[in-house]
């Protein structure tokens, strides 16, 4: 699973959360995904 796939599924999850009105969870999950992507990039390089 490459970073682009992670990002796309991340955006899809945020869209579902937004439509459900869970915007407080949205920013928390976005932060977790951003941290995950940073760790992936560091481990690749």
Image: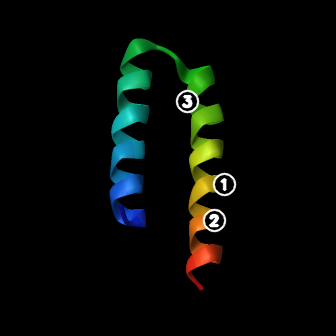
Residue sitting nearer the eye, 21 or 45: 45
Q: Is residue 5 left or right of residue 37?
A: left
Inter-mark Cα distance, 3 to 2:
18 Å
Q: Which residue is mark 2?
A: 38
Q: Which is in the foreground here, disc 3 or disc 2?
A: 2
Label 2 residue SS? helix
Relative to residue 11, is residue 37 depicted above or below?
Answer: below
Sort mark 3 into few (<14), some (14-19) or many (20+) by Cα contacts within 10 Å: some
Could you tell me residue 31's position as x and y percent?
65, 44
Q: Residue at x 36, y 19 (%)?
A: 19
Which disc number belongs to residue 14? none
Quadrant where the N terminus sits is bottom left
Label 1 residue SS? helix
Relative to residue 20, is residue 5 depicted above or below?
Answer: below
Q: Which residue is mark 3?
A: 26
Q: Could you tell which of marks 3 and 2 lies nearer the N-terminus? A: 3
Callout 2–callout 1 Cβ contact below 8 Å: yes
Q: Which is in the foreground here, disc 1 or disc 3?
A: 1
Quadrant where the C terminus sits is bottom right
Picture quadrant where residue 11 is located: top left
Q: Residue at x 55, y 22 (%)?
A: 23
Which disc number belongs to residue 35? 1
Q: Looking at the image, how many numbered discs can be counted on the residues?
A: 3
Q: Is residue 7 left or right of residue 30?
A: left
Q: Residue at x 62, y 75 (%)?
A: 43
Could you tell me residue 18's position as x and y percent?
43, 24
Callout 3–callout 2 Cβ contact below 8 Å: no
């Amino acid at each position: 699973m490459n970073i682009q796939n992670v990002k796309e599924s991340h955006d899809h999850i945020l869209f579902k959360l937004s439509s459900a009105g869970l915007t407080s969870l949205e920013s928390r999950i976005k932060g977790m995904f951003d941290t995950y992507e940073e760790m992936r990039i560091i481990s690749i390089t």
